[in-house]
Structures are given as structure tokens and as C-alpha cells.
Amino acid sequence: MSDGARHIERTFVMLKPDALERSIMGEILGRFERKGLKLVRLELRRVTKDLAATHYAHLVDKPFYPELEAYITRGPVVACVWEGIDAIRVVRNLVGATDSILAAAGTIRCDFGVDKTENLVHASDSPESAASE
Ligand code: UDP
Ligand code: MG
């Protein structure tokens, strides 16, 4: 909401394979909990190549897509839904900018992320993507 209106929203978050490999899933989920967001769904799953291509449809033609596909399919992920006031924006702020090197101090990606690909977390960027994801 650009005009300051605030609403209870739900947002889709996915902890990517590096979050599980590095055993920081609890740390990341804890940040959403401590912010006051409510966990409404959580599931351990695998991302297939087909699902990766759907989820990252806006990126399949990019030169880095093969690397992104290998990353997101290489191990289990945790898919979850969080609810709260302005949850989509709140979660994007907690997660930080795409490139972990440039992400603001105190964000999940700044504190734990490695680079532009291995950045630990996916979070919906709009009500439309939250609903479809
Ligand atoms: N990504 C990448 N290289 C890039 C840009 C993005 O590997 O140059 C990966 C990265 O894992 C990112 C995901 O593709 O999180 C989705 O990209 P998007 O631009 O949607 O960034 P996000 O919304 O995750 O910040
Ligand atoms: Mg995105």
C-alpha cells in the first residue's frame, strides 16, 4: 500500500536450500516470529525443475538461470506463509536486498547471505505474487 493504508496480509516465504544446509532455519524463522508475524503454514518440500521454472518465470531467460535452477533444486526447502500487518512489505524489509553483499545491515541476507544467488530466502513482493505463490 503506497498511500499508507495498512492491512492484515499473508505472504509466502521460502527458506532456500542453503538455509537448511547451513542449519540457520531456526534463526531465520525466529526473526519472523520475533517481529510478531503469525505462522499459518509450514512445509518441508523439494523444488523440481518444473516448479523452479514456474516460480522464477520472470528469470528463466536470464544468463544466470541455470545456476539459479541448480541452487533451488539441490536440496529441501521450507515453504511457509506468514500473516500480519503489511506482512509482504515487513518480510521483504526483514529479508533485505537481493544481493547479500549490498543488503542493509541487520537484514537476513546481510547477516547470513553469501552473494546474489545464495541469499537464503524468497519472499513475495506483491499481493498478486503472494496469492499465486
Ligand atoms: N538471482 C540470481 N542472480 C541475479 C538475480 C537474482 O541468482 O542476478 C536469484 C536470487 O536467488 C534471487 C532470485 O534469483 O533471490 C530471484 O530474483 P529476484 O530478482 O526476484 O530477487 P528477490 O525477489 O529474491 O530479491
Ligand atoms: Mg523476486
Image (spheres, rainbow, N blue to C red):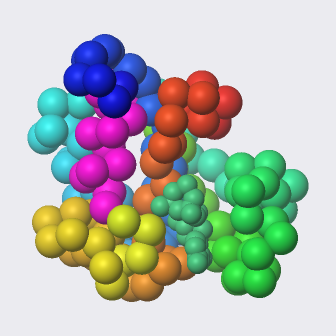
Residue at (73% x, 64% y) in the render: 59
Tell me if residue 94 is in the magenta stretch: yes
Residue 88 against residue 100 in the figure, above or below: above
Residue 65 against residue 85 in the figure, above or below: below
Front residue (pair 33, 21): 33
Residue 75 x %, y % = 63, 68
Q: Quadrant of residue 128?
A: top right
Residue 118 x %, y % = 49, 78
Residue 82 shows in the view: yes
Residue range of the region highlighted in magenta in the rendering: 81-96
Task: Give the side of residue 53 with respect to residue 19, left or right.
Answer: right
Residue 47 x %, y % = 71, 56
Quadrant where the N terminus lies?
top left
Tell me if residue 92 is in the magenta stretch: yes
Residue at (77% x, 83% y) in the render: 63
Q: Quadrant of residue 22?
A: bottom left
Residue 85 shows in the view: no
Residue at (50% x, 35% y) in the render: 126
Task: Give the side of residue 90 with respect to residue 132, left or right.
Answer: left
Residue at (36% x, 65% y) in the render: 97
Q: Quadrant of residue 87?
A: top left
Task: Give the side of residue 105 with respect to residue 9, left or right.
Answer: left
Quadrant where the C terminus lies?
top right
Task: Give the side of residue 65 with respect to residue 10, left or right.
Answer: right
Ligand 1: quadrant of the figure: bottom right
In this figure, what is the number of numbered marks? 0
